[in-house]
Amino acid sequence: MDSHYVNYKQFEPHRLTLAGAQTKNSKANPSQNKPAAAYQTADFNYLYLLPDGKEIKNTFCIEWATMKFYGIQPPDPTKTNSNSTQTKANLDKNNQEIQECLKVADVVHARMIDLICEPTMKAALKAKNIDAQSAKATGANFKKLFYYPEDKTTGEVDHNKNPTQYFKLNSYESSKTKFLAYDENKKIIEIPWNIMEKADYVGKPLIKYTHIYSNGSNVSAQHYMISMVIEDLKLRGSDHIQKNTLNAMVETNPDLINKISTGLATIKEKLDQMSVNGPTRTKHDDSKKFEPLQSMSVPLNQQTVPVQSSQTQTMPPYSQAPQSQPVQSPPSLNNFMRSGPTQTYSGNINQPDGQHQPDFQQAQMNQQQQYQGANIPNQQYQFAGQQNQPIVNQGQPIPNMNQMPAVAQQNQPIPQAQPFNMPMAGQFNPAMLNNLAGRITT
């Protein structure tokens, strides 16, 4: 159990030592394609001076100066080297206490290098890549305890930026990192991690440097945070940045508070109403475009609809059945010719008989007709006075049901359909129009 620690101000280099080196094997990690591998390790110890003058050797734990931290970062599965929960510290280089802390950190770092580079230990750790002088100066092959940002162009330390450091947190329940504070009764309380994840906080971290890790090419000091005494805590965000601006605005405009409060109350009331009544529909609903006929939709194939007679009428296939309409009187001949299934002719209708040449082809009779986006095959249907005539009017719309001639009056039988032969090319005679008109009004 870690029951002793030293504050950075009382650190003495000669009290820090390394135990004998050992060889261990790492576990294989198939998900990252990492096989099991051998590595070397040596534990840190510190000889603590007790208040009564006695000394005791224990694990090396040091309490650093007050620092600012930013939340808690969980492990990042996308990064091979990010397998632990950690928190990031920012050290204000202009703060006097931080400056003293950084000097001590360099002393601790230098002492660790001296212990590693002792000939027997260096051979046991297989740390042949470490040069004591360059490691102390720049952290080459053995990183410093705090990270100093470097200039991307020169590679030298950028003294205009604050040093930072990621500290690992222990997530094991038996030795979980604790965030400690006093409550209003001066009782020590532990702040849960889920709060610290969303907070910026200031405190003194107690760090345990456990051992040296070496795999022959990389050498590092392993550590984790035991606990932290919290001095300040607030929710992450920028609510405090414009505090002075808000205070100045309230002083010059005292009604600002009431104005904002009224606006917020109005918005909240509207949101509450929407949550009860549901949002108002603003998007067009295509499913409401047509009302079904007798709660049923008409399929694309030919349908037979009963009427008030023993006869039946055969309707053209529509993609949607139109709404029922009151019976209308028969349309005029011109309206019927515009709405009914006719041929398309080019040229002047006033030309002499026999000179009218239809510009349709017989092969077009088998092409599909289109109505409101649906592909409809050529079908046969009946009008009064016309029987089994194919639709040959390619490119013209199928007549609207509201414009079709009424073929059955109420309480009247449907007249018997009589054959009518559509003239083909070279057979058109305007005199036939009179015959057709007589059949419609029959």
Image: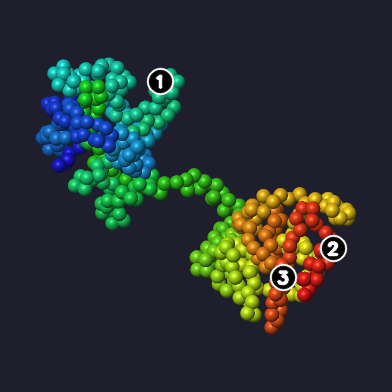
Q: Amino acid at mark 1?
A: Gly
The image position of residue 209, as x and y in percent, is 22, 33
Could you say whether the residue bearing mark 1 is in a helix, strand or loop? loop
Instruction: Identify which residue is drawn at 70% across, 53% down.
Output: 395
Disc 2 packing (10 Å; few <14; some 14–19; many ≥20): few
Amino acid carrying mark 3 in the image:
Gln
Question: Residue 418 — which label?
Answer: 3
Identify residue for label 2.
431
What's the amino acid at mark 2? Ala
Dot 3 falls on a residue whose secondary structure is: loop
181 displayed left or right of 391: left
Give me the disc on residue 155.
1
Indicate whether 35 appears above or below 115.
below
Q: Residue at x 21, y 25 (%)?
A: 215
Which residue: 22% across, 22% down?
A: 216
**128 above or below 305?**
above
Mark 3 closeness class: few <14, some 14–19, many ≥20 residues within 10 Å: some
